[in-house]
Structures are given as C-alpha cells and as structure tokens.
Image (cartoon, rainbow, N blue to C red):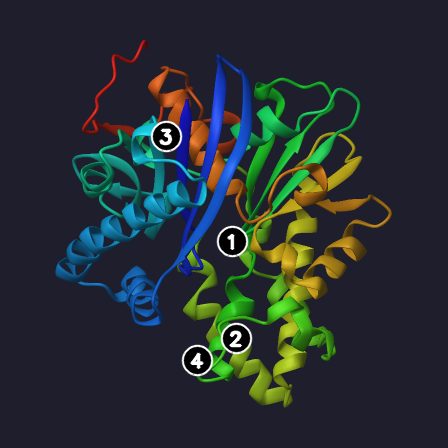
Amino acid sequence: MNVIGLMSGTSGDGVDAALVSIRGRGHALHVAPLAFATYPYPSSLRARVLDSALHGTVAEICHLNAVLGEVFAKAAHRVIRTAGLRAADVDLIGSHGQTVHHLPQPVREPGVGLIRSTLQIGEPAVIAERTGITTVAQFRTRDVAAGGQGAPLAPYVHHLLFRDARRARLIVNLGGISNVTYLPAAGGVETLRAFDTGPGNMILDALVQRLTHGRQALDRGGRMAARGRVDPKLLIELLTHPFLRRRPPKSTGREEFGASILTRVLRAGRRRRLSTADLLATCSLFTAMAVGSARRWLKGPVDEVIVGGGGVRNRTLMADLAAVFQPTPVRTFDEAGWDSKAFEAVAFAVLAYQTIHGVATNVPGATGARRPVVLGAIIPGERTRPWRV
C-alpha cells in the first residue's frame, strides 16, 4: 500500500507529509520512503494555533479544527505531487493532527472517576473529503481510553525500523517536546521503554521568537547559542523541574514547558543580565541534560544514541547531547538511513497501515495503558476498499 503520514508537532510550525510504500503483515513490515514535503503554517495561523492551546475559546478551536483539516489536506496533495503520483495511487492517510491540549495526569471527575484527556484538531473528515482517500486519525484517544497517556506512540515504529540484534539503542526525538525509546539488543516490542523527557525545541524557539519580537522563529543551526555561555545558576534551577523526577510512563507538552517556563527563564535572564545567546546556550544544555536524565529509568546499557526530529539541525544542541552521552556514540536518523524531519510523519503512516489491518500499536509499557489496543478512527474515502482486517 502507498500511505501518507501527516504530522504537526507541538512547535506548531506546519504539516510534515511523508509518502511511503508499506508491505507485510503483523510486526514484519517493509517500509520504503517515496516522497516528503512540508506545508508551513502562515505566521498568523501558527500564532492562533499556539494561542489556542492555552487560551482558545470553544468557537476558535471549532473553527481551527476545520481550517487545519483543509491545511492537512493541502499537505497531502503536496506530497502526492512531489512523488509524481495521483491521489488515486494512494491507498491511505494517517493524520496525527495538531495537539492543542494534552492532560495525561488523571483528574477525578465526581460520579465518573479518574479522567485523562488529549485533544488533536485537523478534522479528518475534511482530509478524506478533499483527497478522496480513507483517513485514519485520533490515534492518541484510544490509548487514553485504555488507561494510557496517549503518548508516546512512535516507539512502536522505532522498534520496527531501528531494533538491532547486538546493540542496545536509545532513540531520541527532538521535536517541540523530546522523547526517548530504549530498544534492548534483540528485544521484542514488549521489552522497550519509552517516555517524554521534557522540552526539545520548544523553549529555544520561544526564546528566539520573544527576544527578536517575532523577526526570527528559531535559532537556525544553533548559531546564537554557540556564541553564549551557560549560566550555572539558571541551569540548576531548570534541572529542578518536577517532570524530570517523575517516574515513567510520562508525557508532557506546552502545558508544562510553554509560557510558564519561558517567563521563568526571561525573569532569570533579566536578574542576571544574561544575553540572548547566554539564555539559549543554557536552555540548550538543559534540554540535552533532560534527555540524558532518561538513563536513570533504563535497565541495561546504551550502546548507541540515534537522534531525529527538527532539533538535529541545531548543532549546539547536538554537541550538548554528544557531551551528555559521552563516550556513547550519538548519530542522526539520517546517518541511519531515515530523514530526521520526515520520520514522525512516516510513523503515522505505519500506524494507519496497522490500524487498517487490525494490529495493536500502542505499547502499554510506554504509555501506561492497561492493554494493547488498535489505535485510531477510520474515515472512509471516496474509493472505500474492501479492507481485509
């Protein structure tokens, strides 16, 4: 099957679209990349998406759900054109959507019980209608319903594509939020460990946007951070964040590493008269050390660290990671044969393929769910096929 994966992370900068060819059954799949494209959000839309995560009204989120459905559909069409194919050549779309709120810690609801919740928007019915292609979406909510945190979900795909018979690997994703997957040598999917570690690009991007008054969206290549000096006091303060001490399974988002921590960093910077470069250097090392702190929850050695996500293009952050994990080698998804930027979109293409074939892809050891479940809601396309489930 030719399958498109659509992904927009917590950075909210646009939609990554990956088109892959998948064949196989069960946990023995062959996945081959065909094309990758990015559909950036216009700056005004990005601002509205990020604001809706904390302050959005029901009316605004309702409207954005439909708007992003259209944007995700455009991203799907873009990657189809990039591959030189037609929509009729594509069998399936898997859409993660755009997370606007993630509440994995249970809240007691009187008369109902403990409730976890997560909300991704980008209406899949719009995607299916605009493309004519069957669309799978809402992957996280079924895991939450089964008692899990709904994240992380990529570890299943990490296991399929990165497991090694002789080396124990730590797979690191540097998106807006960072997460890790530990793959013991020759281990089955039930042996992996996976969880969020804290911020990835989120604090770094927010600092640049605030301190440049929106003129820049990110520290390209980590060049500004490379000119700064780490402030030990601020670094120690950041490392006391309670999320780092929380035992897995655990996941997080903008609720913990968004506006509130940005305010703390900026206040500390004013008190200590730190430059923009100093703040970025300090937060870069904090991000790397938060990823490194994952080792306290692992049982077994780490022979190799493989890093993906947009953060691999930040040379300062990558250098900090290499220092934190020294002497363990650190390399990128690209060096392992996968496009770092495209991989999470690839992951949701694989998850959609497995949903259609009735294969459970959440990992209870990673999300905390009571049992493995088939993820996602299926929206039939124009050409509904007789799926053999």
Say which quadrant the C terminus sits in: top left
Element under disc 4: loop
Residue 153 visible from this viewpoint: no
How many neighbours does mark 4 have within 10 angstroms: few (below 14), some (14-19), or many (20 or more)? Answer: few
Tell me where residue 150 appears, x and y as whole percent. 39, 37
Amino acid type at circle 3 is: Asp
Which badge, 2 or 3, comes first in the chain's sequence? 3
Element under disc 1: strand
Q: CA–CA distance between discs 4 and 3?
A: 37 Å
Amino acid type at circle 4 is: Gly
How many neighbours does mark 2 have within 10 angstroms: few (below 14), some (14-19), or many (20 or more)? Answer: many
Tell me where residue 164 appears, x and y as whole percent. 72, 24
- What residue lies at 53% left-to-right and 53% top-to-bottom? 175
Which badge, 1 or 4, comes first in the chain's sequence? 1
Please tell me the numbered disc located at residue 143: 3
Q: Look at discs 4 and 3 and give the one toward the viewer.
A: 4
- What residue lies at 55% left-to-right and 76% top-to-bottom? 265
Amino acid type at circle 2 is: Leu
Residue of label 2: 207
Residue of label 1: 177
Residue of label 4: 214
Name, please, the residue furthest toward the right.
327
Q: CA–CA distance between discs 4 and 2?
A: 10 Å
How many neighbours does mark 1 have within 10 angstroms: few (below 14), some (14-19), or many (20 or more)? Answer: many
Q: Is residue 226 above or below residue 284?
A: below
Q: Is residue 103 above or below residue 240?
A: above
Amino acid type at circle 1 is: Ile
Name, please, the residue furthest toward the top.
388
Element under disc 2: helix
Element under disc 3: helix
